[in-house]
Amino acid sequence: MNAIDKRRLVSRVVLILSSISALIGLLFLFWILGVLILNGIESIRWDLFVYEGAPPGMLESGLKHALIGQLILVGCATLIGVPIGILGGTYLSEYAGNSRFGNFVRDISDIMMSAPSIVIGAFVYAVVVLPMGHFSGIAGVVALSIIMIPIILRTTDDMLQLVSPTLREAAYALGAPKYRVILSVVYRGAKAGVLTGIILGVARVAGETAPLLFTSFNDNFYSTDLMEPMASLTVTIYNYATSPYADWQSIGWAAAFMLSMFILALNIIGRLIILKRKGA
Amino acid sequence: MATIATIEHEKALHVKDFSFTYAKTAQPSLVEVSMPIAKTCITALIGPSGCGKTTLLRTFNRMHDLYAGNRYEGEIEFEGRNILGPKEDLIRLRTRIGMIFQKPTAFPMSIYDNIAYGLRLQGIKAKSELDDRVEKALNDAAIWPEVHQRLKKEASSLSGGQQQRLCIARAIAVEPEILLFDEPTSALDPISTQAIEQLIMQLKERISIVIVTHNMQQAARISDYTGFMYLGKLIELGKTDTLFVTPQEALTEEYIMGKFG
């Protein structure tokens, strides 16, 4: 066997091995999606959006409480997480630069991003739930926003830094004060990237269960009171799926299907924005 | 000592014993540069890479102040005062002394908003006045016929040469006294380059121009005065006609003959 044949053989072996690995990864993704879609579509009914939770065996049983609860929890977490994340990212990119403090904040955020979410749940349990004396929607919101902030902060930081220094200089050269340069030129240049960060951050917290288990807990009935325990799709999936009742399990599948489609849609929108930006 | 020819015009800027050192370096990038810049003329700065011409240009609108730790000594006189003083209002200074960069720096907004940017910074809000000044600036930059039907389109839809003329229009919209050009055509094709050169020559009727260029032919074609810099020093400043034909300094002659650079 000569050298060229040997290289071709090695190349082919590596190609086959890496293709198989990629296929295995894809197989599980589509398997999960397939099982979800099959079971979810079978279980989904319009009245799931109308009725709140009911004891097993009741016909008028639905997910309204969990859907609304989920929207309130994720929505409020977004309202807290997005401004803090964007302002923090702006500070890092535009004011802290490569200073020691800036890099310290970056490192801490990176650690926070990979912190197990149940640890954050435990933290919020200690500082919010225990002093309040009971589980509450607000505790869930706090937990989710703590998870969201470092994601948005770091993407904002990265995206703002991608805006070319010359573009900033051009704005300064026209006599723009620093805040105008940031607001009108840097933010505009990084708009798509920052938006993607927000979407990915929302998608991430929308799928969280662990930090909600002992913060917002759950509620089988419709409630919009943030001071009381609040239902969420994720915890509802957990409760219904692990229950022994067939009708609850079916509703659990429907909830899992809705949540997955929502997160899938958010992720696809996020990628599309990135693609569009690269194409521009 | 450098050979400085007598300037027959009024002075727009006067650099006096100016030295500059970048942050975190000990070696100064500019050493005791003294040079007058003539009003309503084009002054070209030439010299090999790293000679300090862009560094000098960027001190005229104090771009170096955007980055911490840069040090300078000496004076630069503009409108009767030293613009290196600690109390200099940099925002006002930069509206009086505009700058065009090597690569076009169109902002990510519409063509109209690009031009209106500087005007809005000056507090002009009335739509009619903005419309008039935007049109005038685009006309003065000889790009109005190409863009007047798509003012609301993103500036990034323009070609590189058009974007560069857009940036010139944006800079002249705020009616500066001086315009600084940092190798404005080095990223452009020959036809766009010619358009920009013609434009610069028209602008000198009312604006004093300093242009850094790598291209000696460009300096010879368009400038009234040329300064040759080498290793952070101004070697010679003369009328362009004279400097390229009978340079006074041996170094200048070697450089324009192409013996180094």
Image (cartoon, helix red, strand yellow):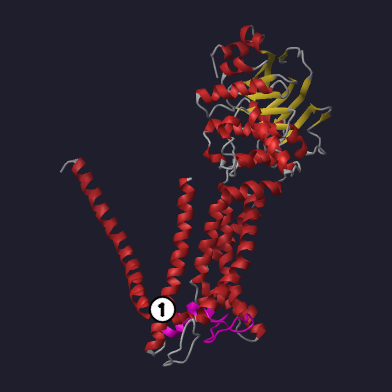
Q: Residue at x 61, y 61 (%)?
A: A85
Q: Nearer the viewer, residue B231 or B91?
A: B91
Residue at 20%, 45% (x, y): give it.
Answer: A6
| Residue underneath mark 1 | A254
**Which segment is the magenta one?**
A211-240
Q: Quadrant of the N terminus of chain A?
A: top left
As drawn, is A232 to the left or to the right of B91? Answer: left
**Residue B258 position (above or below residue A249):** above
Between B139 and B53, the one lying in front of the other is: B139
Number of numbered discs on residues:
1
Q: Give left or right: position of A157 versus B84.
A: left
Quarter assignment of residue B21: top right
Asked whether residue B100 is in view, the answer is no
Q: Position of residue B74 (x, y in %)?
A: 78, 28
Q: Position of residue A49 (x, y in %)?
A: 48, 79
Identified by mark 1, the residue type is Ala
| Crowd class of label 1 (few under 14; some 14 to 19; many from 20; radius 10 Å) | many
Q: Which of the 4 image quadrants contains residue B224?
A: top right
Say if B224 sits above or below B23 in the image.
above
- Residue B111 % position (x, y): 60, 39
Residue at the right extreme of this rendering = B80
**Along the line of sight, which residue is nearer the eye, B110 or A119?**
B110
Residue A221 inside the magenta-drawn segment: yes
- Residue A169 position within the rendered picture, expressed as x and y whole percent measured from the top left: 65, 39
The correct choice, above or below, for B69 with respect to B213 in the image is: below
Q: Is residue B241 magenta?
A: no
Residue furthest left as drawn: A1
Q: Chain of mark 1?
A: A
Q: Secondary structure at mark 1?
A: helix
